[in-house]
Image (cartoon, grey):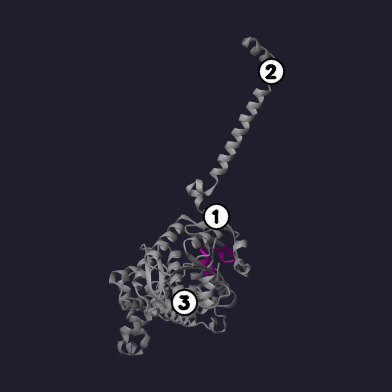
Amino acid sequence: MRKHEDNASHTQQTPLKRPWSFAVATIVFLTLLCANFATAVSLLPQSSPTSAYETPSTFDARAILSPDVRKGPHHTVLDEVLPFRHTHRYRITSPYGQFEAYGGEMLKIRIQEIQAIATMDEEVNHFQSVAAGATHAILSPFRFMLDLVHEPKETLLAVPRGMWHMATRIGEMAVGERGNLEDPENTELLGFSSVKRQVANHFGVDVYSSNRVLQEKLNSLSWAGYAGGAAVRLATLPIGGPAGAVLTGTAFSTTVGELLRDHTPEELRHLNRDKLAIMRLDDSLIEAFLQHPWYSPRHETVLVQALFEMNIVKNRNTFFKVATSARFEEEALFFQRIAEMLLSYHQNVKPLEEFVAIDDRLLMGLTRDHTLIGMLPVEFLPWRAELAESAETVATWASAQQVKKVELWISGKPTPRAHRELLAKGITVRQGAMDYLTFHRLANASDL
């Protein structure tokens, strides 16, 4: 009877086959649903170590730069801004060639340099004097030696006082080699480099810049000035302002500008060495900093002067220990800017008590009321693994040292994600710090 019922049941269901087809459809649907769910889960940040952080991305210059920075009379920043190391690479086109800048600070400097190049081309009619300048430079040492042989007494009495001062540079030249961005010793002793420094200062550019096009223009113009050509009408030309936009105010800018204009690299190194000794740095650390391959005389002088003016702040040697870790030109500029920002904060916001290097690599300032201050001269701050690790290290150190408040001053701004994560660690963020510290106003710097 059971067998008969089974056969009957089978006979009735066979023509439609609905249960079987429904089962297959259900299995397929569930399989797809599970696959989609697995895919969706795999995209969530917590499911993958790499997606827990914001990855470096390509930016559009039109979205992140102001119109006047992105495009000017003599330059255009290309739209695509690519991630590069810990910053971004900008590409700039101009009638004078294509330039690259790594980070927002170097971008500002390159744009200023392009403007100076344009001014030199448009306003200075010096080409007829260049040949005369070169001839004068070549002949002058031979004329001096010839006169010294035939009329030694008269020649020595006729030597200007500055010539004897020039002789003192030779000792410093023998101590260390000149950097790639410094003029050769012979042009220094001839007096050409002195003219070049004056020209660079007048146009508001760095005489030690790595911009090769700018160096060619400076050399060309300076040869004409060296010859005394009247065509070089410096007095009637617009002045470009401090090279690289020194941040900390008129007095500091004036001091640094005069040092760079009036002193040779050897003299600057000698002055910087004396100041570092007054700060009681070890001789080995002094030489490691002054002979560092990525610090030009300008980087060294700005940084040393900034730290020298913070004479009441303890542990200044800590700053130089961390600064010697610079591996590229943009990192040397990075530490220079940090020094300027900390000096401006110390003078105009709140006095610093000491410098601290947390975990021997995170350089920060500590105020007298136990506020921990970090400076970041960067235009973007995404939430990346390095930042997460640093934030955790700082938060742990601050807690152990009973620091009352931790502040991070950023020249640009963090991403929303980075802002949330930093606040969660107890770190207050101030964006637009560069504008505030430069112009001493709160208009462009606000707590997020």
Q: Position of residue 93 (x, y in %)?
A: 58, 63
**Residue visible at 58% across and 75% down in the picture:** 443
- The amino acid marked with disc number 2 is Gln
Closest to the camera, between mark 2 and mark 1, is 2
Any magenta on residue 100? yes
Disc 3 crowd rating (10 Å Cα; few below 14, some 14-19, many 20+) is many
| Mark 3 → mark 1, Cα distance in angstroms | 32 Å
The residue tagged with tag 3: helix, strand or loop?
helix
The residue wearing badge 3 is: 344
Tell which circle, 2 or 1, labels the residue nearer the N-terminal end: 2
Disc 2 crowd rating (10 Å Cα; few below 14, some 14-19, many 20+) is few
The C terminus - image quarter: bottom right
Most foreground residue, 224 or 405: 405
Q: Which residues are magenta?
A: 92-109
Q: Are marks 3 and 1 in contact (CB under 8 Å)?
A: no
The residue tagged with tag 1: helix, strand or loop?
loop
Any magenta on residue 82? no
Tell which circle, 3 or 2, labels the residue nearer the N-terminal end: 2
Q: Position of residue 172 (x, y in %)?
A: 32, 75
The residue wearing badge 2 is: 13
**63 on left or right of 229:** right
Farthest left residue in view: 283
The residue wearing badge 1 is: 57
- The amino acid marked with disc number 1 is Ser
The residue tagged with tag 2: helix, strand or loop?
helix
Most foreground residue, 266 or 313: 313
The answer to whether residue 182 of the structure is visible from this angle is no
Closest to the camera, between mark 3 and mark 2, is 2
Q: Are marks 2 and 1 in contact (CB under 8 Å)?
A: no
**162 on left or right of 214:** left
The answer to whether residue 36 of the structure is visible from this angle is yes
